[in-house]
Image (cartoon, rainbow, N blue to C red):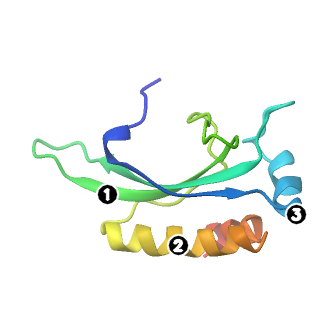
Amino acid sequence: MKTPNYHDFYQKALIPIGFNDLRSLKESDATIPNSPYTHWLIAVEGVQLPQPTIYYNWKVSIYPADCDGDFNWRKPYYCSENMELMDQANKLASSFVASGKKDELSSSTLLEKIS
C-alpha cells in the first residue's frame, strides 16, 4: 500500500472527541478495538495528480488520534472528495473544526457525504 504524501499534509486541529462523536466513531470502520483514541485530527492533504508536471488537488481528512496526535493513516474516519483549490479544503476543514468543538462532527461529515 502506498504511504500518504506527508509533504503536503497540513494539520488544522487536534480536538477532543465528544461523547456523541465517540459513539459514532465506535460504530464506524475507522475504529480499532481498545484503541486510545481521544481526539480528532483534522487535516488538509495534497493529492498529487498523475501527470508529468507536479499538480495537486486537495482533500480534507479526519483521523481518530490519541492526545499526542498519533493516528493510523490507513483508517481515516472521513475523507472528502478532491477539490481543485486549497482554499475550498481549508474552508471545509474549518467547518469541521467548529463542528468537532460542538460534538457534532459525525453529523457534519454525514451531511457532507450526502451533499
Q: Which image quarter: residue 57?
A: bottom left
Label located before the other in sequence (2 or 3): 3
Q: Disc 2 on helix, strand or loop?
A: helix
Residue 81 in the image, given as x and y percentages of width and height: 48, 60
Give the answer, above or below, for where 66 lies relative to 83.
above
Furthest toward the front, the residue is 68
Q: Nearer the viewer, residue 2 or 89?
A: 89
Give the answer, above or below, for where 35 lies relative to 24.
above
Give the answer, above or below, for where 55 lies relative to 18.
above
Residue 2 in the image, given as x and y percentages of width and height: 42, 27
Label 1 belongs to which residue? 57
Residue at position x 10%, y 46% in the image: 53
Give the answer, above or below, for where 43 lies relative to 90.
above
Q: Disc 1 on helix, strand or loop?
A: strand
> Relative to 84, is 113 on the left or the right?
right
Label located before the other in sequence (3 or 1): 3
Q: Nearer the viewer, residue 12 or 62?
A: 12
Residue at position x 70%, y 67% in the image: 100
Q: Badge 1: few (under 14), some or many (20 or more) residues near its Cα, within 10 Å?
A: some
Q: Nearer the viewer, residue 30 or 94?
A: 94
Q: Disc 3 on helix, strand or loop?
A: helix
Circle count:
3
Residue at position x 52%, y 72% in the image: 94
Residue at position x 60%, y 69% in the image: 97
Label 3 belongs to which residue? 20
Label located before the other in sequence (1 or 2): 1
Q: Badge 3: few (under 14), some or many (20 or more) residues near its Cα, within 10 Å?
A: some
Label 2 belongs to which residue? 94
Q: Amino acid at mark 1?
A: Asn
Residues at marks 2 and 3, CA–CA distance in whole angstroms: 20 Å
Q: Are marks 1 and 2 in contact (CB under 8 Å)?
A: no
